[in-house]
Amino acid sequence: MQIVKDFVIKYNLERTPLAFAVSGGADSLAAVLIFHDLFPKLPIVALTVDHGLRPTSNQEALFVADVMKKYGIEHHILYWGGEKPVSGIEEKAREARYNLLFNWCHEHSIYHLVLAHHLFDQAETFLMRLQRGTGIYGLAAMSEISVRDGISLLRPFLNVHPRLFKDFLIAHHLQWVEDESNQCSDFLRVKMRKFLPLLEKETGITPEKIAYVVRNLQNTKSFIEDTARHIIQTKIHQWGKSGFSFDFTEFLSWHPELKFYILGSLIKNIGELSYSPEAESILSLIQQLEQKNCEKMTLGGCVILKANLKLWIVKEYRQNASFASHCSWDDYIKKNPIFRGIYIPSLLKEALLKEK
């Protein structure tokens, strides 16, 4: 499959160990086998998460193990233990799945995880985010490659029709598992999946057309991100792992999209979040900061304050220990003379001292 070969060459993955998230469904099962066929010398390992949410989950994981053994592919089953949630199951199971996968990858020094997201997944994600009223970053949906918790998530099949996976498995005389949850209309993604054929029939809006729009949005998003990264590197000062500061007047001059992206990125960094805060929260923060009477706000584990003509984003410590003594700060200055004579808010001083 040329699209996969091009992906591997584009991201220089010819000799890179790859982990694959394999559920036993047609998409992920075919994905790992396609890579195995195309790159027989590539070191790959298949990982199956057993959520324990359905009676057949372990049987399905063992089915994947059998297929991987047949093809000589290393395979591991990761178990989600403990009590299971009674609400928000879809989102919490997804988070648990990624945590298990990421932890395994870190423990075994494999930093690339291949996901079998395809053309219809991309279209469904776009519609889900449209339904939530998200902006350009959400509507740009899924990227070919993204990084989360130090692991590169690879999506080489985003422009591939899902029938390709089933055709591949049928040609290789292989069965796959049908996930019962894919028929549950309680889940928004399933609703969107069932809506796509109707959308195409009634309007001519196909998954391919949605994916084309997504790629255009991704180009716009990429331009904004590149501009924002340049500003972060040249205009914003980082204070260890404790905070950022930058000129407030310059902040007011930025385009609204740059304000949105930069604040989200900085808060995500200092707050040690997996994702930037919700778009609505960031937009509300920007609106409040632009008011003259706003001096301090909190969001995403950070305190955002205006002081000394600057905007400061500082790590928030909710359990306030007593502030370090003046002598302790003097000791810090002796070890870090570069900070001598510089205005630093007390909250940032406290955070810097707690880094030690």
Image (cartoon, grey):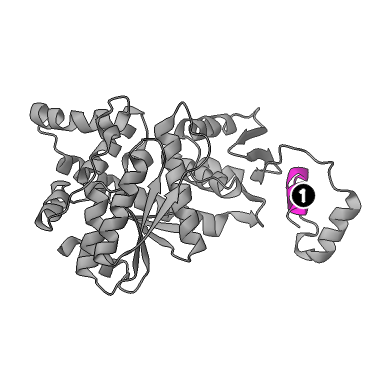
130 relative to 34 in the view: left or right: right
Q: Secondary structure at mark 1?
A: helix
Q: Residue beneath label 1, please? A: 349
Q: Position of residue 64 (x, y in %)?
A: 29, 53
* Residue 193 can be seen, yes or no: yes
Inspect the image, locate mark 1, and give the three-letter code of the amino acid beneath it.
Lys
113 relative to 309 in the view: left or right: left
Q: Quadrant of residue 112?
A: bottom left
Q: Position of residue 132 (x, y in %)?
A: 36, 28
> Which sits in the foreground, 36 or 145?
36
Give above or below for 11 relative to 265: below
Residue 349 included in the magenta stretch of the image: yes
Q: Quadrant of the N terminus?
A: bottom left
Q: Quadrant of residue 18?
A: bottom left
Q: Quadrant of the C terminus?
A: bottom right
> Which sits in the foreground, 310 or 34?
34
Prevailing secondary structure class for the magenta stretch in the rendered image: helix
Q: How many marks on residues?
A: 1
Q: Residue at x 46, y 26 (%)?
A: 87
Q: Residue at x 91, y 54 (%)?
A: 327
> Which sits in the foreground, 30 or 236?
30
Magenta residues, start to end: 343-354
Residue 232 included in the magenta stretch of the image: no
Q: Quadrant of residue 311?
A: top right
Give above or below for 288 relative to 61: above
Q: Residues within 10 Å of mark 1 (few under 14, many from 20)?
A: some
Q: Position of residue 195 (x, y in %)?
A: 19, 28
Q: Position of residue 4 (x, y in %)?
A: 21, 62
Return the residue found at the far right.
Answer: 327
